[in-house]
Image: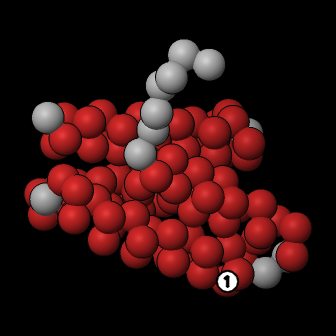
Amino acid sequence: MSGVRFSASSVAPVLGLAGGFIVAQQTGRRELGGALFAVVGAWCARDWYRTSGPAAAAGLSVLYVAAMGGSHPLAKRIGTWPSVATVTAATVAAAEVVTRVAAR
């Protein structure tokens, strides 16, 4: 390993976005996936606020919610899993950049 470390709040969106999708898909109950998405989002927002401040927390929270909303129309163009992977990667990358900059 190269010793690269990621903050928990930058990788947690994987659980909320991709994990929420998997839960909804496997159980056939979208509300369960939505609940996981909401719980993880609330945890991330609190952690982003604590580590990076209110502006970063607000921006990343908007991105997190927009990623969920944007994944649906994107899925019609590129497919379900590519869409989930794309919005999840974008959210994780943005969260990592913001948390690293704020840590300086």
Q: Is residue 58 visible?
A: no
Which quarter of the image is occupied by the C terminus? top left
Which quarter of the figure has residue 85?
Answer: top right
Can residue 42 be seen at all in this image of the molecule?
A: yes
Based on the displayed image, in which of its 4 quarters is residue 88 positioned? Answer: top right
Q: Position of residue 72 (x, y in %)?
A: 59, 54
| Location of residue 42 in the rendering, given as x and y in whole percent from the top left corner | 40, 75
Amino acid carrying mark 1 in the image: Glu
Instruction: Label 1: state its secondary structure.
Output: helix
Residue drawn at point x = 42 percent, y = 72 percent: 43
Residue under label 1:
31
**Which residue does the image show at 22% across and 56% down from the upper left?**
51
Q: Nearer the viewer, residue 31 or 53?
A: 53
- What is the total number of numbered labels drawn onto the structure image? 1
Residue 52: where, in percent of width, then height?
18, 53
Q: Quadrant of residue 44?
A: bottom left
Q: Is residue 56 left or right of residue 7?
A: left
Q: From the viewer's perspective, is residue 27 above or below residue 75?
A: below
31, above or below 25, in the image: below
Viewer-nearest residue: 28 or 5: 5
Residue 69 in percent (x, y) is at 48, 59
Of 53 and 28, the residue lying toward us:
53
Instruction: Name which residue lies at 48% across and 25% down.
Output: 4
Say which residue appears at 69% left-offset and 36% top-offset.
82
Pick the residue in front: 7 or 58. Answer: 7
Colouring chosen for the image of the structure:
secondary structure
How many other residues sit within 10 Å of disc 1, few (<14), some (14-19) or many (≥20)? Answer: few
Q: Quadrant of the N terminus?
A: top right
Q: Is residue 39 above or below residue 75?
A: below
Left of 20 or right of it: where is 29?
right
